[in-house]
């Protein structure tokens, strides 16, 4: 996927790795990743994260 709006994180980011890095429970990270996927803010494929639309992503987090 190569679109100028996308951000591709080229690292294997498992839920366990993210939870360790953020010092959160695995279940919490998994729940929030699912929310971001459901809202079409990210795509997670084989441990890689793709941010679809930076503006939409930023707007979502500013509204929290």
Image (cartoon, grey):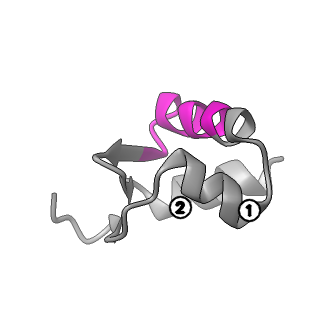
Q: Is 41 covered by the magenta stretch? A: yes
* Tag 2 residue: 55
Q: Is residue 23 above or below residue 41?
A: below
Q: Quadrant of residue 29?
A: top right
**Residue that carries the numbered disc 1 in the rendered image:** 22
Is 49 on the left or on the right of 29, as rendered? left
Q: Main secondary structure of the magenta part?
A: helix
Report helix, strand or loop for mark 1: helix
The residue located at (32%, 67%) in the rendering is 8
Badge 1: few (under 14), some or many (20 or more) residues near its Cα, within 10 Å?
few
Residue pictured at 38% horizontal, 53% vertical: 52
Looking at the picture, how far across and down is residue 48, in whole percent? 34, 56
Q: Are marks 2 and 1 in contact (CB under 8 Å)?
A: no
Q: Earlier in the sequence, mark 2 or mark 1?
A: 1
Residue at the image position 28 percent from the left and 47 percent from the top: 46
Q: Nearer the viewer, mark 2 or mark 1?
A: 1
Q: Quadrant of the N terminus?
A: bottom left
Please state the extent of the stretch shown in magenta in the rendering: 30-42
Q: Position of residue 50 (x, y in %)?
A: 36, 56
């Amino acid at each position: 996927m190569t679109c100028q709006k996308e951000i591709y994180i080229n690292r294997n980011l498992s839920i366990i790795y993210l939870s360790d890095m953020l010092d959160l429970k695995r279940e919490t990270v998994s729940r929030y990743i699912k929310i971001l996927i459901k809202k079409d803010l990210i795509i997670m494929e084989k441990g890689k994260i793709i941010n679809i639309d930076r503006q939409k992503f930023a707007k979502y987090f500013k509204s929290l």
